[in-house]
Amino acid sequence: MKSRSGVSLHQVPSMVSNGEMSAEEYIASIFEKVDRLDQKIHSYLQLNREPSLAKAKELDRRAKRGERLGRLAGLGIAVKDNICVRSLQATCASRILRGFNPPYSATAVQRIESEDGIILGKTNMDEFGMGNTTQNSAYGPTLNPWDTSRVSGGSSGGSAAAVAAGMASVALGSDTGGSIRCPSSFCSVVGLKPTYGRVSRYGLIPYANSLEQIGPIARDAESLWLLFSAIAGYDAEDATSSREPVKSPKGDGIKGLRVGRIKEFFGEGAQQKVTERVMDGGAKLEALGAKAGETSIASLPHSLAVYYVIAMAEASSNLSRYDGVRYGLSPERGTADWNSAFARTRSEGFGEEVKRRILLGTFVLSAGYYEAYYVRAQKVRALLAQEFALAFKKFDVLFGPTMPVLPPKLGERVTPLEDYLIDINTVAANLTGLPAISVPCGLVDGLPVGMQVIAPMFREEVLLEVAAALGREQGLKSPPLEEAA
Amino acid sequence: MSRKSRTRKTYSVDLRQVERLADLSRLSLGPEEAERLRGELSSILEYFATLEKVDVSGVAEGADASLEGGLREDVVRPSMPAEILEGVPQRKGRYVRAPRVF
């Protein structure tokens, strides 16, 4: 992807290092864009303007002195509001965490800073990551830069919209059931949900621990990889962190790669125009030398129920920490006793969707129902993992549409269940731990479509090859808002 | 409830169950909110019940525990009591003020 000045985003760090480009001017130009566009889009909850500009200035000074700068030098990075950055509020877009200042930064953020990346601010999201439109934010929705009457997707909607509109070079999101890939698909950017254990979750405010990962969102595969390789890798602060080394993409294309179309992703429930675009994308991969075929993952239709049972169970347990005593919202208690003060804080602090998930999570874990819902869901989850393992004997990667639908209209009235159903293609990667990427795959009536590609555990580099090949083939499109970046 | 009727579940929750769940979750719900949730929860649970159709005989749960996992050495490290206390919303000096228990 090239900006108007003809510079690709992934070249920014080396150009800043060489003194060919001013980090200060570049970062200032991003904030100008934020000032111009974000009143309409609402991707940021909080800006880190002065410290960002000061840091950029410092990088320019160090470059002038001939110092070697980090591999993210000068890149402006937006961070989802459930990832802690010391000195910036972390609200998870919830009233219950308004005013919470985390005493430390997430490992991913520390790694960005040690590689001289610049944290521009915190981005909007569905409250605690629970949603796929960013309409569940307590601070108002993020709009889609491609059509501001539509949602940005979620839950990392602020991060994806900021990247799409050129209000950040790259961004961090988190993905529990599709929260990086959904908004990436809806906003036509590249978003990666890394393998479970690949990126440290230290400093990520938890929602469902067995499912979630921090990951990068970018306009192209090359800048995505730059951010991913900076944040990936073992961290002693996260007990689920893996020591598996990160492999580099060879950069020699996808000739001979065995790509498998997942039959279930193209069935009923998906909009035909969307599946057609993704079929076209598959044909492009073939034209680039990949060998395509079809496969079936029989348990996929059940993955959504499995996901919601498990995610809600984990959420109900995780969110019990919000008691108004140690941090966050804390209304006057008067003479209320512990339980009623506790209930009052939570009822005022949590939004509708969060309450719904806590109640359902409590239900599926309660005596008499635990076996029927939770244990059963865990078994189907295991089955799903076996089926994917089998499919990867025949194929190097699997693909389908990221989202079965185009970005919905803002405020469209649907029941909670109807709302959950559009996550049907993304949740399997979280249940199995597999890495998955969403890559822009053309437009339908001016609205973005994303292709989801899934790889075996710890094979993110293959996903990168596919994303880069498809990106080169299609070129980059910018939202009609104005030419981005 | 007889054993038989227990196995033939209907997947709706009644208002009493919603209130019980709210109590366990430490949430207080208004009457309209409780009624709305009763309907929503029922339809979602009915959807969850589709899992009954999957044959899981012989499948072990918890197959996701394949990660090596890592426990840290049990050593004393500096903590940050001052910073954490700063974030406590209701305080009396160095003490955290909590609601009354009795």
Image: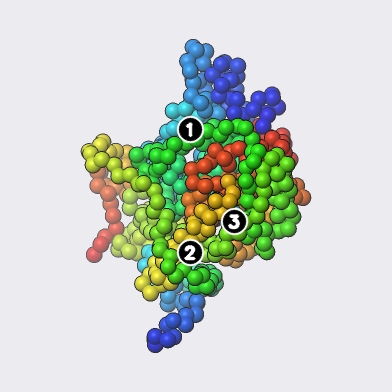
Q: Residue at x 62, y 32 (%)?
A: A252
Give the crowd class for mark 3: few <14, some 14-19, many >=20 residues within 10 Å. Answer: many
Report which residue position mark 3 lands on.
A425
Q: Secondary structure at mark 2?
A: helix
The residue at the far top in this view is A65
Q: Give the letter of the chain under mark 1.
A: A
Locate residue A42: give its quadrant. top right
Q: Position of residue A480 (x, y in %)?
A: 73, 40
Camera-side residue: A207 or A390?
A: A390
Q: Is residue A385 above or below residue B28?
A: above
Q: Is the residue under label 3 in contact with that under label 2 (CB below 8 Å)?
A: no
Q: Position of residue A450 (x, y in %)?
A: 66, 48
Say what amino acid the circle numbered 1 marks.
Ala
Camera-side residue: A416 or A190?
A: A190
Q: Residue at x 77, y 50 (%)?
A: A445
Q: Secondary structure at mark 1?
A: helix
Give the crowd class for mark 1: few <14, some 14-19, many >=20 residues within 10 Å. Answer: many
Q: How is the image coloured?
A: rainbow
Camera-side residue: A327 or A465?
A: A465
Residue A230 - label: 1
Q: Give the letter of the chain under mark 2.
A: A
Q: Is the residue under label 3 in contact with that under label 1 (CB below 8 Å)?
A: no
